[in-house]
Amino acid sequence: MKRRIVHKHPLAIRWFHWINFPVLGIMIWSGLLIYWAYDPYKIQLGDWTLVSFFPDGFYKALKLSRRLAEGMAWHFVFMWIFLLNGLLYVGYTFISGEWRHLVPNRNSFREAVHVTLYDLGLRKDQPPFIKYNGAQKIAYFSIMLMGVGSILTGYAIYKPTQFYWLTALMGGYKTARLIHFALTVGYVLFFVIHIGQVIRAGWQNFQSMVTGFEVLKPSEPDRPALTDVTPEPGPSDDPEPTEPRPDSTPFQPALS
């Protein structure tokens, strides 16, 4: 049976993805080594501690105790790689026009609800195959904003005297550190959900992020390639209809 090759991910996107994944993992690991030295965050109800980030057993199990200097060394080295990779990625998305596919539009939240209900088995009709659905747009764009937040809050707590203006802009040292910690928790949650979705999507989807293409059977529907998907129209640039429409028939968006 003859199979078809469908190109999906450009080389640049794959490089940025596979560099960022281990770098961010090392940043989180080294951040835990630093956090061990002062771990004040917990959820309390009066004098009762409901959740502590993290109990002593967690540090002992992962051998994170008394490694502050090592954690700082790893963290500050890979911070530059994380920053450089992020700047190159953002620059590439603007130059190539990829940003149009990542920025959520007026339909994204409705699409995200549809996708979520389908993934949870609460909705039977499958969302259409598009480059990035609403849930993916919101998630990926949020990760980009979180990366910016991590860099800014990281510098604010790394050099609070030299970058006093940045520390003040972040709400002070304690607030900047709390935001930095919360963003790290967000990355971990994203990892868990993202990996789960990759497993759910199957091997073809995973290997396309390695090779850049999928090999499909003739009966399988094409999934749009990253380079040939037309950006969705914005609120003020709806496409002109190819045929006249009666005034009494309202125009329906393609994804409604």
Image (cartoon, rainbow, N blue to C red):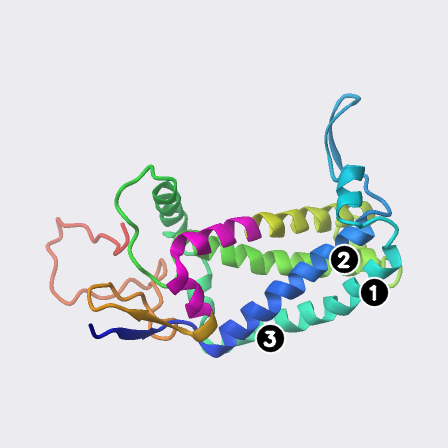
Q: Which residues are magenta?
A: 191-209
Question: Does the magenta run of residues contain 85?
Answer: no
In the rendered image, residue 188, in percent from the top left (x then y), is placed at 62, 50
Give the CA separation, mark 3 to mark 2: 23 Å
Q: Identify residue type, mark 2.
A: Ser
Q: Is residue 175 above or below residue 151?
A: above
Q: Give the secondary structure at mark 3.
A: helix
Give the CA separation, mark 1 to mark 3: 24 Å
Q: Is residue 78 left or right of residue 227?
A: right
User: In the figure, residue 82 lies in which quadrant?
Assistant: bottom right
In the rendered image, residue 14, in percent from the top left (x then y), is placed at 50, 72
Estimate how packed mark 3 is, as few (under 14), some (14 to 19) or many (20 or more) residues with alpha carbons within 10 Å. few
Q: Mark 1 near mark 2, Cβ–Cβ under 8 Å?
A: yes
Q: Identify residue type, mark 3.
A: Leu
Give the CA separation, mark 1 to mark 2: 8 Å
Pick the front one: 117 or 248: 117
* Quadrant occupied by the N terminus: bottom left
> If you read the primary sequence from the N terminus, does the residue marked by circle 1 or circle 2 appear first?
2
Estimate how packed mark 2 is, as few (under 14), some (14 to 19) or many (20 or more) residues with alpha carbons within 10 Å. many
> If you read the primary sequence from the N terminus, does the residue marked by circle 3 or circle 2 appear first?
2
Residue on which the image places disc 2: 30
Pick the front one: 255 or 54: 54
Estimate how packed mark 1 is, as few (under 14), some (14 to 19) or many (20 or more) residues with alpha carbons within 10 Å. few
In the rendered image, residue 113, in percent from the top left (x then y), is placed at 38, 43
Residue on which the image places disc 1: 73
Residue on which the image places disc 3: 88
Residue under the point 75% across and 41% down: 58
